[in-house]
Amino acid sequence: MGEAIKHRGPDDSGTYFDASTGIGFSFQRLSIIDLSQAGRQPMQSSSGRYTVVFNGEIYNFEQIRAELQPRSWRGHSDTEVMLEAIEEWGIEPAIQRFIGMFAFALWDGDNRKLYLVRDRLGIKPLYYGQSGSSFLFGSELSTIEVYPDFNSPIDQNILPLYLRLGYIPAPHSIYKGIFKLMPGQILVLSSPEEEPHIEPYWSPDQDKNLETDRDLTSELHDQLSDAVRLRMISDVPLGAFLSGGIDSSTIVALMQSQSRRAVKTFTIGFGEDHFDEAIHAKTIARHLGTDHTELYVTGKDALSLVPSLPSIYDEPFADSSQIPSHIVSRLTRQKVTVCISGDGGDELFCGYPRYARLRNMWSLVKHCPRSAGNLASNIARLLGNDKIADCFKLSSAEAIYLRAISNCSDPSELVDGASEPATITARIAAFKNRLPEDMAMMTDLTNYLPDDILTKIDRASMAVGLEIRVPLLDHRIVEFASRLPLHYKTRAGRGKWILRQVLKRYVPEMMFDRPKSGFTIPLDEWLRGPLREWASDLLAKPLFISPHAVQQKWREHLSGENRGNLLWSVLMFQSWLASRHQI
C-alpha cells in the first residue's frame, strides 16, 4: 500500500504494525522539515501512547513547541511537535492551535481508538472506507485499491455528479463504500466492525461582519505577510508559482519583501495569445526582482501527457487545467522541493467572473415575466448558448448557479438507471439566505476549491514529489475574508478589490489590471484536432455511460458546438477505467 504512493514521498518510508489490534500504518516521506532520522514516520509520542502518520505541514510548530512544557526533544520536526501537543492538550484542542495543511491518522494505544483528521480547507487528501472486515485509509485511492481484499464496485450513482462537475465531490469517491473525509472533520473509530463517528471541528462560515472603520487593507496585508512568512520555513529549496495574476503576484511580492535573496519563480506559457499569461508573469518577475524560470509548452508537449493523466490523478478527474498544472510542477521540481501558490483568492475575494454574471442574471430573471423568460430562453438557445437558455427558466439564484457550474443540465440522462445524489444542490442550499455572490463563493469554498482546485494541485505536484503551500488558505485569512463585507471584495463589477489594494503597495496597477484568463488549454480545438482520433476511439464504446448520448454530444462538438468540458469528463472516466484494466 505504501509503494502505491511512493511518488508522494520518495525520500524515505516506514511502517508500524500492532499485532494485538491489527492496526497498521505505512508512510512515504517527502523530507521537508528535519531531514534527519528524527523526522521519520510513523512516529510515536514520547509516552508511547500515540502513533501518527502525517501528510502536510504545521507551519507554526516552532511557536507551539515553545508553548509546551519543557521536555526532551528528539529532533526539530513538526510531526514531533504535533504529537506532543496532542499529549499535552488533547486531540481537538491541539488541532485548533495548528496553522497548516494536514491529513493524519493517529492511533491512541491506551484507548484503542483510531483518529483520521483532515485540515480545515481540504488542502491534503484523505480517503477511507470498509472492505470486507478491514477499515482502510490513505492519501490516494491507489493505496486502497492494492489492498488484497479490496473489492468495492464503481458507484454508478456518482457518475451523473461527476459528469455534471468534472470531479467527484466529497464525501463521495468513485467506489461504493469508499469516501473522502470532508475538510475540517475528525473521524473516530473504535473497531473496524463499527460505523465511524465523524464530527466537524471548524467551519469557514463566519456570520459576524468586520468593523469597517478599521484599516482592513492593512489588516489583510499584515495577516498575509505572516501567512507567507510561516510558509517560507523549509529545510529544502523553495520557490513560487507566478502566473502574473493578482493572487500569485501578491504572494510573490510578499515573499520577496521578506527574503534576502531573489525568490525562485516559475511559469509556463502556451504561445497562443488567448491562453498565454507568461508575458505578464515575466513583467511582474522583473519588477519584483525574482529569479524567474519560464517554459513555453507546445501542444505536442501537453498532449504527450494525456495517457498518464489517470495514474497522476488517481480518480476520474476532468479539470483540463490538470495538464498545465502538472507540467509547471514538473518544471519547478527540477530546482526546488517546496513551492508556494496563490490558489484560493478567487473563492475568498470574489474573483471568478461567474459571480458577477450570476448577480446580473438573477437581477434579470427575478423580474422577468414567464412569457418573456420563455422568449429569451428560445432566443438564447437559437444562438447556441444552452446555459443562458436554461437560466431564463429557473426561479432562484441557487438554481441558476447550479446550472452555471454544470457541464450539462441533466447528466442523469447520460447514465442509464443512475440516481444523482443531491450533494451539490444541498451544499448550495446551505447558503441560500446570502447575497448571490456570497452564496456562490461559500459554495465554491466548501466544494469546488477542495474537490477540484486543491485536488488538482495536490496530484499534479505530488506526482513529482513537489510540496505546494497555499498561504491565502491560512484559516485565519479565510475567517477574515468570510467576515469581510462584500463591498471590499467587488466594486463596479471587478473582483478582489481589497487584494488589489495590497498588491498595489508592491506593483504598479497597470501591470496586473486586466481581465482574468485562467490557467487553461484550448481544449475544444484540441478535441477537434490533435486529440480527435484518441477521443473518437475512447468514446466509441463507453462503459456505464449511454453510448447514444455520448455519440450525440460528440457529433455536436465536431459540428462546432463546444461540448469540450462534458466530453473531457467522459474521456477522463474512460481513460481511468482503461488504466484499471476494466475496458
Image: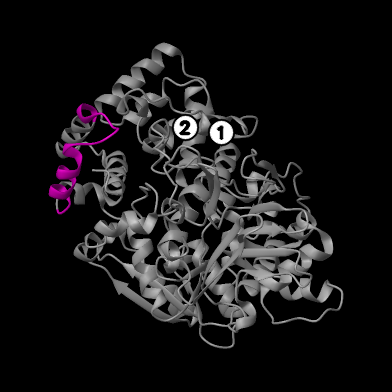
| Residues shaded magenta | 530-549
Q: Earlier in the sequence, mark 1 or mark 2?
A: 2
SS at badge 1: helix
Kindly identify the residue that appears in the image at 49 percent across and 35 percent down. Answer: 358
SS at badge 2: helix
Q: Reply yes or no: does residue 323 show up in magenta.
A: no
Q: Is residue 510 above or below residue 239?
A: above
User: In the picture, which quadrant includes the C terminus?
Assistant: top left
- Amino acid type at circle 2 is Leu
**15 vs 299, nearest the viewer:** 15
Kindly identify the residue that appears in the image at 22 percent across and 59 percent down. Answer: 303
Mark 2 burial class by Cα count in 10 Å: few <14, some 14-19, many 20+: some
Q: Reply yes or no: does residue 540 show up in magenta.
A: yes
Kindly identify the residue that appears in the image at 36 percent across and 74 percent down. Answer: 331
Circles 1 and 2, Cβ within 8 Å, touching? The answer is: yes
**Side of 555 where 326 appears, left or right:** right
Residue at image mark 2: 402
Residue 374 sits in which quadrant? top left
**Side of 508 where 514 appears, left or right:** left
Residue 513 in the image, given as x and y percentages of width and height: 46, 60
Q: Is residue 245 above or below residue 267?
A: above
Residue at image mark 1: 428
**Side of 583 where 92 appears, left or right:** right
